[in-house]
Amino acid sequence: MSTLITGIHHVTAVSGDTQATIDFYQGILGFRMVKKTVNFDDPNVYHFYFGGDLKGEVPGPGSIFTSFPYGKQLKDGRHGKGKINTTAFSLPQTSLDYWVQRLDQYHIAYKSPQQRFADEVFIYLEDPDGLGLELVFDSKENRPAAGLNPNIPAAHSIRGIHHVELWLDHFEKTAALLTTVMNHRLLQESAGRFRYAVDDLPGKYIDILWDINALKGLSGRGMVHHVAFATPDTKTQRKITEQLSAFGLEPTQVKDRKYFSSVYFTEPGGVIFEIATSGPGFTIDESPEALGRGLMLPDLFEWNRDYLTATLPAFDYEPGRFR
């Protein structure tokens, strides 16, 4: 029988200014723009898909970070319980010195490197909207790099997601969901941090931080909207949806996101989870070489292409000043 959940599929955040989002994630962090489309639920807003630097692969589950740039006028969110407060990106352990120098070069504020567990060192920083991020330098990160971004040496490029961090005050039901329905297991525990995973590898980890004194988190600019978990296909998606319902949750109907199909639900701690299929993938409407160049629309918005092209914010694709 197929494994129902294979790891993290993607993380989606809410950002502000379009150009600032491009400059930070593509320019400074070196992600590749994989898809430029719109929010399928609000087509007046872009949906950017950024992919990690993986050799010989079209970016897919585990390497994707996405953003809805709603504009600077959107109210700031607030870190706190009931939210994903940190999204961590994965790099080899040998890249620590490079990234300290790079962040210094572009005057990006960060906290000094810290040890977490035996195999990883991390740097905490925030994007221009205050989204909590970590660069995690993990001895288990062995995915080969493609060297697609000329600004960053391949050996030091971000490979993809490492983990997400949920802040919860009562996490027992969330833990039960992960372990009994979503085939995770508890790997490690330290200082109120509980790490769950389907496998002990970067891109598979879900960290729960138990903090009963934290304020309630608020949605808005600079916050994660949801984390998506990867499932192989529609059959496994249907099976896990049935199990989620039996667990007492209320998953949505399947939604066609063109590059994958999705089911959403709110887990017991209040965080939005998504179950996303691994295919059909990002080359369904663009070649690997052209990924992220054109405005790719779902069929239901194709009739409105001229209007959307004229009204969506213009931005510079090539942030070459970040070399």
Image: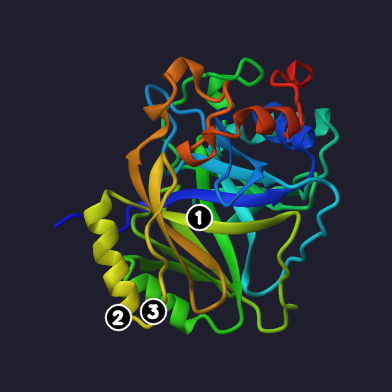
Per the image, the residue denoted by label 3 is 176
Per the image, the residue denoted by label 1 is 118
Residue drawn 38% across the image and 35% down it: 281
Residue 161 disc label: none
Tally the numbered discs.
3
Judge depth for marks 1 and 2 and give the one in front.
2
Which of the two discs, 2 and 3, labels the residue nearer the N terminus?
A: 3
Q: Where is residue 269 in the image (x, y as percent from the top left)?
A: 55, 77
The residues bearing labels 2 and 3 have C-alpha atoms spaced at a distance of 13 Å
Judge depth for marks 2 and 3 and give the one in front.
2
Q: Is residue 256 in view?
A: yes
| Mark 1 crowdedness (10 Å alpha carbons): few <14, some 14-19, many ≥20 | few
Judge depth for marks 3 and 1 and give the one in front.
3
Which of the two discs, 1 and 2, labels the residue nearer the N terminus?
A: 1
Quarter of the picture containing the N terminus is: bottom left
Using residue 260 as the reference point, say whether residue 119 is left or right of it: right
Q: Position of residue 226 (x, y in %)?
A: 56, 59
| Mark 2 crowdedness (10 Å alpha carbons): few <14, some 14-19, many ≥20 | few
Using residue 2 as the reference point, say whether residue 190 is left or right of it: right
The residues bearing labels 1 and 2 have C-alpha atoms spaced at a distance of 37 Å
Q: Position of residue 122 (x, y in %)?
A: 63, 49
Q: What element carries label 1?
A: loop
Q: Is residue 191 in view?
A: no
Residue nearest the viewer, comparing 158 with 309: 309
Residue 246 disc label: 2
